[in-house]
Image (tube, helix red, strand yellow):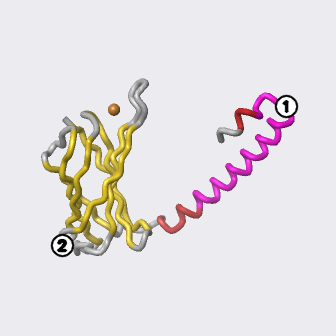
Amino acid sequence: MSSISSTHTHGRARRLVCAASLAAFALAASGFALAQAPAAGQKPTVDIMLTSRPSPPKTGDNTFEAMVKDASGKPITDAEVSALFYMEKMGNMPEMKNTVALKHQKEGRYVGTGQVMMAGKWDVTVSVKRAGKEIGSKKFPITAQ
Ligand SMILES: [Cu+2]
């Protein structure tokens, strides 16, 4: 996308850019349709709960614990679990994000130390993967103190 602005002022180049962006749009649209198809009518197969110590979390290091279960309530013990911490941009401060791996302890409990860079509202997205493929994810809004 960054290359587009350099050719933007030339009429001929702009037409080419338009054609290219239409093609990109078509690809994006079909990709969306493909991604949507298997999800339609599918029940969530992974149940995720997130807790922190302390609660609410503080600026600095906190312990985050995710409980991961399948649809029948049975703990999932063989997944790769991570938590993505995201804070949207505030004024001239850029967005912040960092990812923390949560390690399996026992019975579907995955624990890790998450560094919360500043107080305020964060979205924590817990992602559960098996063999590198995401089988579930859930977003948890938190307010750090
Ligand atoms: Cu911030």
Secondary structure beneath dot 1 equals helix
Q: Under 8 Å from ligand 1: the CB of mark 1? A: no
Apparent side of residue 53 relative to residue 19 in the rendered image (left or right): left
Q: Is residue 63 above or below residue 57?
A: below
Residue picked out by circle 2: 107
Q: Which residues are magenta?
A: 7-33
The dot on residue 11 is: 1
Q: Quadrant of residue 112?
A: bottom left
Secondary structure beneath dot 2 equals loop
In the picture as drawn, the residue positioned furthest to the top comes out as 91
Q: Is residue 5 above or below residue 49?
A: above
Residue drawn at (70%, 39%), measured in percent from left and top?
Answer: 3
> Which quadrant would the C terminus be assigned to in this image?
top left
In the picture as drawn, the residue positioned furthest to the left comes out as 54
Residue 122 included in the magenta stretch of the image: no
- Dot 2 or dot 1: first in sequence order is 1
